[in-house]
């Protein structure tokens, strides 16, 4: 019999994070008993009776782990920068779901010159913290406009001069006549651990951490 004191709950989002985490879970002997793309279940059992998965919205993963609803989580660095990382350890860069955070603008827009002249920019983004810090560090004056998705649309309809968004292949930018004008930070997914759980369930967590590290090549 397993009681809650021995169960490890891992929070992660479906889609690319789930897909790219599968081989790491496999390395720890954890095979999900259902595919979250097909099942509507939000709590998924695994081949290990002591491990279960929570399927959460990508930007909610740090919150579940911070409050201990899950001992472990897998979250993009972009999400962690916005969350702030309170109550979390980030022991491992899993090197998955890699992309970069960048400033992008329409092909014809002279971003460098506007910045050099001290002009004010309207920037649309879902990443308010990261954008605020980036432009503050560079001394660029910006009005940030919060969006929840499809940032690429904003410059096309005059809502913003530029956007801060994630870029991987660059095809979304190209399809909308935008280009990267500044790199902000490389992004990949991290393993996150609830700080209290690391003390209370150290052995169980350490075994999973070791399996993941080995699978990632560390
Ligand atoms: O989709 P939802 O609103 O539920 O949440 P989400 O978009 O945060 O989740 P999801 O599953 O799409 O992304 C989860 C994590 O994957 C993110 O937090 C990132 O850490 C990571 N990741 C890696 C990416 C990308 N690559 C990526 N390319 N997340 C989003 N994108 C988007 C980007 O925002 C842009 O719209 O893909 C588009 C650009 O892709 P390219 O290939 O055209 O350049
Ligand atoms: Mg998405």
Image (cartoon, rainbow, N blue to C red):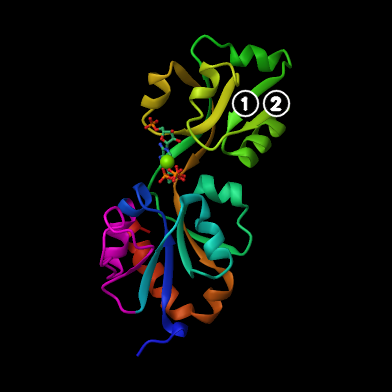
The quarter of the image that holds ligand 1 is: top left
Q: Quadrant of the C terminus?
A: bottom left
- The N terminus sits in image quarter: bottom left
Q: Which residues are magenta?
A: 20-49
Residue 44, position as x, y percentages in the image: 34, 67
The secondary element bearing badge 1 is classed as: strand
Q: Residue furthest front?
A: 40
Residue 190 visible at all: yes
Q: Nearer the viewer, residue 101 or 5?
A: 5
Q: Earlier in the sequence, mark 1 or mark 2?
A: 1
Location of residue 80 with respect to 24 vertically, above or below: above
Q: Does the numbered disc 1 mark a residue whose Cβ is under 8 Å from ligand 1?
A: no
Q: What residue sits right under mark 2 in the picture?
A: 142
Furthest residue toward top: 108
Horizontal side, residue 195 vs residue 97: left or right: right
Q: Are marks 1 and 2 in contact (CB under 8 Å)?
A: yes
* Marking on residue 123: 1
**Image coords of residue 165 (percent x, y):** 51, 33
Q: Circle 1: is it few (<14), some (14-19), or many (20+) Cα within 10 Å?
A: many
Point 36% across, 52% down: residue: 14
Query: Alpha-carbon neighbours of circle 2 within 10 Å: few (<14), some, or many (≥20)?
Result: some
Q: Is residue 6 above or below residue 177?
A: below
* Residue 192, position as x, y percentages in the image: 50, 61
Callout 2: helix, strand or loop? strand
Residue found at x 39% / y 34%: 168
Q: Is residue 181 visible?
A: no
């Amino acid at each position: 019999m397993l009681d809650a004191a021995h169960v490890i709950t891992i929070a992660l989002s479906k889609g690319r994070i789930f897909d790219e985490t599968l081989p790491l879970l496999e390395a720890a002997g954890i095979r999900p008993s259902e595919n979250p793309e097909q099942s509507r279940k939000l709590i998924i059992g695994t081949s290990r009776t002591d491990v279960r998965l929570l399927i959460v919205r990508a930007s909610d993963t740090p919150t579940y782990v911070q409050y201990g609803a899950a001992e472990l989580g897998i979250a993009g660095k972009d999400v962690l920068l916005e969350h702030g990382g309170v109550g979390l350890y980030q022991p491992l860069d899993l090197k998955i779901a890699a992309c970069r955070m960048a400033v992008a603008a329409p092909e014809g827009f002279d971003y460098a010159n506007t910045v050099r002249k001290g002009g004010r920019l309207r920037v649309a983004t879902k990443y308010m913290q990261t954008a605020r810090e980036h432009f503050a560090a560079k001394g660029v004056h910006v009005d940030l406009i919060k969006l929840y998705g499809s940032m690429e649309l904003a410059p096309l309809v005059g809502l913003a001069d530029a956007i801060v968004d994630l870029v991987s292949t660059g095809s979304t930018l190209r399809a909308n006549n935008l280009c990267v004008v500044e790199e902000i930070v490389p992004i990949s997914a991290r393993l996150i651990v609830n700080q209290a759980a690391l003390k209370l369930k150290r052995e169980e967590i350490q075994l999973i951490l070791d399996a993941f590290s080995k699978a990632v090549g560390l």
